[in-house]
Image: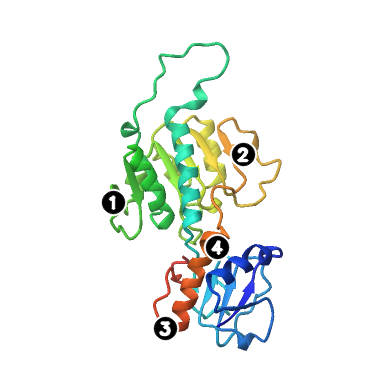
Amino acid sequence: MRVRFSAAPGAWDEWAAPLRDACPEMELAQEGDPASFDAIIYAPGGDIADFSPYVNARLVQSLWAGVERIVGNATLTQPLARMVDPGLAAGMAEYCTGWTLRAHLEMDRYAQDGVWRNGQVPPLAAERPVTILGMGELGRAVARHLTAIGFPVTGFSRSGAPVERVTVTDDLDLALARAQVLISLLPDTPGTRSLLDASRLARLPRGAWIVNPGRGTVLDDAALLAALDAGHLGHAVLDVFRTEPLPPDHPFWAHPNVTVTPHIAADTRAATAAPVAAANLRAAMEGRTVEHLVHRSRGY
């Protein structure tokens, strides 16, 4: 099979060898006659804006989990698969577990200032409810880590599909009301933008933490700052933002109850993602079911 690679400058050096190792029958190229390609491997920053000349491409395989930058492209009529990378899922689960434990153990309370605070003992994990917004591959990976520690986990999912050891609901208000720690892993879609506005943030228990490594567009920035300033929310750990890099003068940087991390919660790793792409390419060529196809109407 002949596959066109289109991604940001520098990505070729990272991806070409792992992709060829995972799929040795593939001829991978960065340029050529569009009609000669059987599939496209794509990531934002690539040079393909018009997919219509790729008339023989049976699949566009994204290297990113998020597809909001491509799914609305009117020229993209080929099947589109998002990347579900086990390495990315592991990284996301570790990030969310680490910050949930920081919130749960109230680590920031123990300032190294000579004050003996032995009367301030945190509850056990079983007494600290966590809600995860979005129960896809990443949400389930995070839930497995947290339930193994003992946290009671509620998962918000439009589908309501069951997840082992998780209370799954399609009632957002109920999910928010239970969350002493709220983790947002929702995609960026028209239905999720500014979903966590002032009215929904008010439904969280007083003192709740928010951990957002999903998409920055889900949070209403001004509403979040207001809820923190009012003392309704305890802390926000933010890894994704409406504008990235986050501008140096953005109030998140200076707020005492906001922790900014620079979009490092999880990343697609070529070594673990290349076999996923290879399996999908083979399936498309052989007429079998391709995993993780994007539903265009949902946007993910």
Write down the residue under mark 1.
164
Q: Is residue 44 above or below residue 261?
A: below
Residue that mark 2 sits on? 252
Q: Earlier in the sequence, mark 4 or mark 1?
A: 4
Q: Nearer the viewer, residue 34 or 211?
A: 34
Q: Which residue is denoted by mark 4 in the rendering?
A: 64
Please name which of the two marks, 2 or 1, marks the residue nearer to the observer: 1
Where residue 250 appears, as percent x and y from the top left, is 66, 41
**Please, is residue 227 above or below residue 51 in the view?**
above
Q: Which residue is mark 3?
A: 287
| Residue situated in front as seen by the camera: 121 or 190 | 121
Residue 22 location (% of width, % of height): 53, 69
Q: Amino acid at mark 2?
A: Phe
| Disc 4 to disc 1, C-alpha distance | 26 Å
**Mark 1 Cα-neighbour bin, 10 Å: few <14, some 14–19, many ≥20:** few
Residues at marks 2 and 1, CA–CA distance in whole angstroms: 36 Å
Q: CA distance from mark 3 to mark 2?
A: 49 Å
Residue drawn at x 38%, y 42% is: 146
